[in-house]
Image (spheres, grey):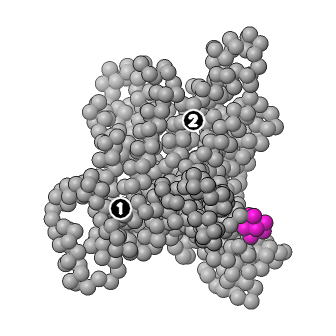
Amino acid sequence: MIKVVKSFFSKRLSSTALLFLVGLFCFSVFIPFISPYSQDIYGSVHFEIAGQPPSFSHWFGTDTAGRDMFTITIRAAFYSLKIAVGVVFFSVLVGVPIGMFSGVSNKRTDEVIMRITDGFLAFPPMILPIAITAILGPSLNNVIIGISVSWFPWYVRIARSQSLVISSLDYVSISKSMGASKYHIIKTHVLPNSLTPIFTQASIDAGYAILTAAGLSFIGLGAQHPEVEWGLLVTQSRAQFLNHWWVVFFPGIFMCLTVVCFNIIGDEFRNNETVEK
Amino acid sequence: MGLIMLFVTSITFFIVRLLPGDPVFLLVGDHPTEEQIEKAKNDFGLNEPIYKQYMVFLQKTIMLDLGVSLRTKQPVLTELSKRFSATFELVFFSMIIALLFGFPMGLVSALNQNKRLDYFFRGFGYLGLSIPVFWLGMILQIIFFGILYWLPLQGRYSGIVLQDSPIIYNSGFILIDSFFSGEWGSFTDALRHIILPAFAMAFGVLGIVFRTTRSATIDIMSAPFFRTFKFYGIKNSEIIKKSGYKNTLIPVSTVVGLSFGLMLGGTFLVESIFDWPGVGQFSVLSILTRDFPAIVGVTILYSFIYVIINFFIDMLYIIVDPRIRD
């Protein structure tokens, strides 16, 4: 794992991607203190400067309520990244233990767990989050719950296949024959050896969580004011977007860049995975 | 397949029932009176124990009874089947676009590995995976309608054109119907309407198809049979053209099957941007009005379609790959 992290930083592309994400996060945390238009984040309106194209004083222009697009776009990064981290965190937290348990359990337990998992995977990607947020009501936290419920099965699968592979290795069977418990095998052998594939999946999923959450916002099931993430930001300006391209363009570009960065990081992990073997 | 469908239905039922929130309020809408609540409880059998409700729900789903939409007061199944052809047309058209571009791009990219064209295509593929569908739709509208005036903003056809060259509805698929009734005016009009939404939907799947084709082709190029051919002095591109591409069909058809799921999810967004009168748009309206039976109906319908498509893709393997046929 340390080797993976080391080689990760030696690559220019992946370290740039990571730098971008970390930089964006820090910037989004501090933007309320730096920006001259920080009150716009909390929803103040200035109709006298509404709908201005990008200029020196407003880098990304202003929206139809006269809010500075640059400030609110950067601030929205905070909530989008929060969704990404939250979804990945909960999916891993639920999926990985179930998968590892399934992998080291007897055949029948394994079969039951895997069939239920398959049931979750039979839903098309957006459908389950839509159904869940529709029931729970739209909010940022419910979006995180909704997406996590539909994604944890992937982690069950990865963790299970890893634990199947690893527990068939010689040194693990020997450890088993010496009376090691399931818990011991998971903790000392399976978990450390399956971190890389889990990280691969997690970083790619983090990007897609942002896209899915944005999609949910777009159909009115996502985050609500004042937790404006990029999807909601695009949606807010939907009525006037044909004459004001900048109000949809910039949040979208940021979303796109962020997802690309998460993908690059994930690919880097995956390349290392094959090297490791 | 039947088992998976049973699971899907069960998971839907338990999610609806186990999540916090009284189902009565989901069924009668906001601000009901006491009588309405009592009546709904009786009508929908909510006073029964949960396992009985579960059995009733399963029975009804098997009989394709998805309940009555609160918004339109019509059976959900009728509403969905009315709009199904529009969605079907859009999804399939998008899938054809994605395959038509993604597959050849993958082959070309693999043949020119680590050259400029490869990098360009890979960047394009990355972009496809990372662009938010609805954002792409809006940007396309700004460019092709707002600036260039080349293509219509939204909808499935223009009423005026349809008056001039009326088409006989047989299948409900405007493209096919107008093509076979020979009304070229309507055909080109429908085609012009479908291009933008279909491209917006196809872009993400295009990236997936491209990546899969590329990596599968690269894998094949180190296979023994490939090296033998090369040894005979046949060019890489010739080998791919004659026999190599067949080996990529299995992984590609797998991702195509999975990508249908992505597209079905995309219909919610794309249809509501482009005002496409399909299932996705209907569901978004239902979501906004908290029309619960409709949401559950769409969830089940889409999951069933997804399962069925992937079942057929599994069948397709046998046709594509003779080795599985035994």
Residue at x-position 70% and y-position 13% = B229
Q: Residues within 10 Å of mark 2 (few under 14, many from 20)?
A: many
- Residue designated by label 1: B77
Give the mark nearest the N terminus, 2 or 1.
1
- Given the image, on which type of amino acid does mark 2 rest? Val
- Element marked by disc 2: helix
Would you say residue B130 sits in the magenta stretch?
no
Rendering coords of residue B250 (x, y %): 54, 30
Is residue B256 something that shows in the picture?
yes
- Residue designated by label 2: B252
Q: Nearer the viewer, residue A112 or B78?
A: B78
Rendering coords of residue A168 (x, y %): 41, 23
Instruction: Name the chain letter of the residue that bears numbered label 1.
Output: B
Image quarter in which the N terminus of chain B is found = top left
- Given the image, on which type of amino acid does mark 1 rest? Leu
- The circle drawn on residue A117 is none
Q: Is residue A140 above or below residue B235?
A: below
Residue at x-position 64% and y-position 22% = B243
Rendering coords of residue B37 (x, y %): 23, 78
Left or right, residue B53 beside residue A197:
left
The image quadrant of residue B137 is bottom right
Would you say residue B149 sits in the magenta stretch?
yes
Given this view, does label 2 or label 1 mark the residue nearer the observer?
1
Is residue A76 something that shows in the picture?
no
Q: CA distance from mark 2 to mark 1?
A: 33 Å
The image quadrant of residue B104 is top right
Q: Is residue A251 above or below residue A203?
A: below
Q: Nearer the viewer, residue A131 or B72?
A: B72
Magenta range: B143-150
Rendering coords of residue A39 (x, y %): 66, 81
Residue at x-position 27% and y-position 73% = B24
Which secondary structure type mostly characterizes the magenta part of the structure?
Answer: helix
